[in-house]
Every structure is written in structure tokens, then in C-alpha cells.
Amino acid sequence: MAELNTEAKLKKQLKQEKIQLWNPPYTDDQDGEPGRQHMQELAERYAPLLGLPVEEVGGALEAIRVQAVKRGKGNKTFRESNVATLELLLPRDGKKDPKTKNHLETRLDVLVQEVVDRIGDEYGLKYIKLILNGKTLSVDQRLDEQGVKNHSKMMVLKVSDAEWKQQLSEEEEKKKNQDESVQRTQKGFQILSERDGSEDPDSTPFLEIADQRGNPLKIPHEEKKALILAMGFHEKGRSLMKKKQFDNALFKQATQGPCSAPKPGMLDFVNKVKWEAWKSLGSISQDEARQQYCDLIGSLVAAEGGSSAQVSAQPAASGTTYETLLVTTEDDITTIKLNRPAKKNAITTEMYNEIIAALEQAAKDNSVITVFTGAGDFYCSGNDLTNFTKIPEGGVEQMARRGGDLLRKYVKAYIDFPKPLVAVVNGPAVGVSVTVLGLFDLVYATERASFHTPFTQLGQSAEGCSSYTFPRLMGGAKASEMLLFNKKLTAAQACQLGLVTEVFPDSSFQSEVWTRLKAYAKLPPNSLALSKQLIRSVEKQRLHSVNEAEVQSLVERWQSDECFNAVMSFFQAKSKL
């Protein structure tokens, strides 16, 4: 992990200085060998910047150079022969040599089924499926139609016999539905083609073929029927395909830039419509295409999710009202309730700012303890990913910087909070709502709660000081299962690992927890606050340092294509539900 982080920092520095390691003087044009003197000078210059030994920096630079040279050869092959090089992430039992990367050379205009067959034959895998950016590739579509590019990384997953049979059954059902749809369309156009306009046009519509001036053409009856049927199918197909392919075209413009692919042949109807949709976007920039794509997918997700209606917010003791929170003070307890139940309490940018304000308010009021909980069935579903669709004029870099500043301030509010902080987890918890639990003093959960941190799945990394608090609470291996490999914990598992203090039956959860909290609120407030500060003071500076490092890492992640593609894949999958 440290090596990858070093390489990422070096790549950023090389990019800023526009240094191309695959070109002279860093690589010899003839044999591809490194220019050792210049590589050594570069390592000596970068080592103090990274605070690392020259040998370690030199090794990382050489790894980047070798990778770049290999990639350059692949690009040359692709330009000359249109044969792409794909990296395959194989299951363990499919690897011939675990220490080497596995590559496949193929044209991108072939069906995925052909590639699946090749991989199965070469690596002895019976049933497999290919995953790109978290999305399963359809075997009946071409590679390039599904976003596969030269140097793409594809995950190869084995499929069980049962899953394979289910997949075949679903494909047969899909084909059956398509056939029925075609038959209905054909029947409709056949009925229209039989009409000649003698019926009442207001109640019985008909089609008429005319020339460019609008004069009806006299065509023999049978020929007219055939022509109307063909034209009807053609126009309906184009209309449906263009509507369907617009989001795909925006995605391509956002990730690859303006269309430079050759126009498909006249009889390649599907790819021709896709090409036209992409070509119609002209020369709009990738940033603008990203924003349009984000707006489109965001609107689809909003439409699918319905209204984000909230429970009417009641003012806290200070009289402050919030749009996304319910903040109340009663029995010496300030309760901050996340209040977007229709959106599973997903945290928007506005909500981040309101939580910070609510914590500042609770720190100064007369309450003894502060409680977090959620409205509805969810505790919190983590970040509202539409936050990533609001790209400012300054582009993705500005969005990432602003997001980093807000996250830094948000986590700091938890680290510095002076009173006992309690989480009453009333349902599933995801993402940042889970990671900050390591900064709470008590975490009570209902038995139906779950805890999930799918960061790497979305091309991101840990936050909320979880890279420090989770290993400290549950040990390194268990923390890695959550933070690296997206393992979801049940409430019982989270309690066993130390993330949750106690689990309660769902039927008595609220009554048991609040009875206990009201008793805690009667304890001497100054004694509670002082005791908490003594515990927190031991590691407070460490927590602030961890928060800063996590924010810096995330700002880099948010600007990466890997993160963008993962989040957009999430939106694409959600919009198709």
C-alpha cells in the first residue's frame, strides 16, 4: 500500500513537471533501457520532497517508467493494428503464475462472448463473467460498446452452474419479451398500413406517403403496406435507440472526449445510432460532458427515488431550525436526528454543514450528553452521491478541494466535541456514518442494524479517522476486511469487534436505550466532560493528523478517473433499476 501511495505521489509530481519517463533522456529510444544518470538525478531530487530514501524513490520511478514503456508499446500496437491490450484480474485458481500480470490482446469491435470463450479456453475456466468498473459486461454486445478501451482492467469472475443456468434463463426471457414487443409493433403498423384514409381521421389515424412537397404518392397497395411497415420499424427503432444511447454518448464524451471513431457501416444499425448520438455532442469539453452526464443521471436517480420529504423540523432550545436535521433538547439530552428518511438519511453538502453547526450548538448548550440517530428505518446511508454531480466552474479539482475542506471540518467537529457523544443506530449505517463511530463514546444499535464501508468499491478511501480507530478497536485484519474489502457487519459482529457498545432487540430498542440515556444525563455534567477530555487528550493530536492524511488521500481519489468511473457506474446501475 505504501509503495502504491509513493507511486501516486511521484506520478502527480511528474505530471506537474511534464516529465515523460518513457522518452529520452529517461529511456533509450533504441533498446528501451533506462537512462540511469538522469533517473538517479530525478530520484535524488524527489527523495527530500517525499521524505523517503533515494533508493526507494528510485525503485518507484523505475517501476513507473517500465509500466509507461510497456503501455507505450501497447498504444503503438493499438494505433497500427487496432488490437488492444487488456489486463485480466483472474481468480486465484485461474492464474498460471501468481506473480505476473495476465494480459489479453483483442480487437474492441468483437462480441464479449468471443472474449469470454477465449479466456475460458486459455485459463481452463468453465463459466465466467467479465466485470468492468463494477458493471457486468453483456455477452451479446461488443467490447467498445460497453466502455472497454485499450489498457482497460477487467475482472474475471467464476460463475456457478446454478448462476449460469439462471443467466441463460434471464437471457431467454429477455429475448422472448423483445420478440413479443416486435410482434406488437408489427401488428400495429400492419393495421395502419391497411387504412387508406376513408375512415374518420380523428378517431381512426392512418399513414400516408408523400413527396417532398407534401403531395400524396400513388403506390400499389401491397408495396405501400411493405413500405409503411419498413419505415415504421426504422423510425421507431431510431427513436428508441437515440433516447437509450444519449446517456451512453455523454459518458463516452466525458471519459474519452469527442467522437473520433469511424462511422459504422450503413447496415450496422445499432452501432450507427450510438455513433450518431456520440457524434452529435460535437466538441463539448470532457468537463462539460461530465457535468451534463451527472445532471442527467442525477435527475434519473431523483425521479426513481421520489421526493425527499422530511419530518417537520422542530427548533432546538436555541430556536435554530434546520432543513435536514431534527435537533431537540429534553431531559438534559440534545438529540441530533438525521432527517431525510425518504433518502435513507444520505448526507448532502447542506447536511454536512448543518451537522457541524448542530454540534457547535450542542457543545455550548446546557445539555449533559448529545445523541445522534436517524429518522425512519435507516440510521444513515452515507454520502448522497449526487454531491459528486455538482461540479463547479473550476472543474473536478475545485470540487475535490471544497469537498476536502468540508470533510476536514466535519470530522474535526467530532474530534473536538467536549461532551459525551452517543450514537443510537436505529437501522443500517453506511460510509461516513460508520467511520465516525470510532469517535463516539457509546454506540448502541438495534439488532437489525448493519455497518458497511464500501470505499474501494466506489474508488475512494477511508475517512472519519477510521484508518486509525478501526485497527485500534478491532485489529488490523478485521479493519482491513471493512475498509479495503467492503465487508458488511451485522450488529452482533460489530459489537463483538468493539465498534458497537451493545445490541438491543428491535422491539424494545428505543425504550431500553432512552431509559438508560436519561439515567446517564443525571450524572454530574462537569465530571463527565472532564473525564472525556482526559481520555481524548491522549490521542487528540494523533486524530487530527490522521484526519488530515485521510482528507489529502480522498482529494486525490476524487480527482481520479477510477473514482469518477466507479461513481458513474453506481449511478448507471441505479438508474436502470
Image (cartoon, rainbow, N blue to C red):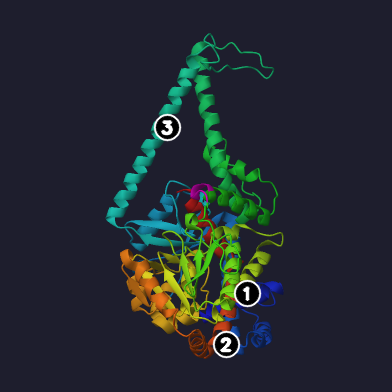
Q: Give the residue at the far left of this rendering.
A: 162
Q: Amino acid at mark 2?
A: Gln
Q: Is residue 342 magenta?
A: no
Which of discs 1 and 3 lies nearer the camera? The answer is 3
Q: Which residue is mark 1?
A: 11
Specify whether 39 is left or right of 326: right
Which of discs 1 and 2 lies nearer the camera? The answer is 2
Q: Earlier in the sequence, mark 1 or mark 2?
A: 1
Name the mark on residue 214.
none
Q: Percent position (x, y) of residue 453?
A: 45, 69
Range covered by the magenta-colored residues: 303-307
Q: Residues within 10 Å of mark 2 (few under 14, many from 20)?
A: few
Specify whether 323 is left or right of 473: right
Q: Amino acid at mark 1?
A: Lys
- 479, above or below 577, in the image: below
Q: Amino acid at mark 3?
A: Ser
Q: Which residue is mark 3?
A: 181
Please give the name of the residue rendered at 33% of the width and 65% of the height, measured from the top-left corner: 506
Name the mark on residue 541.
2
| SS class, disc 3 | helix
Residue nearest the viewer, comparing 342 with 147: 342
Q: Percent position (x, y) of residue 448?
A: 34, 65
Specify whether 148 is left or right of 180: right
| SS class, disc 2 | helix
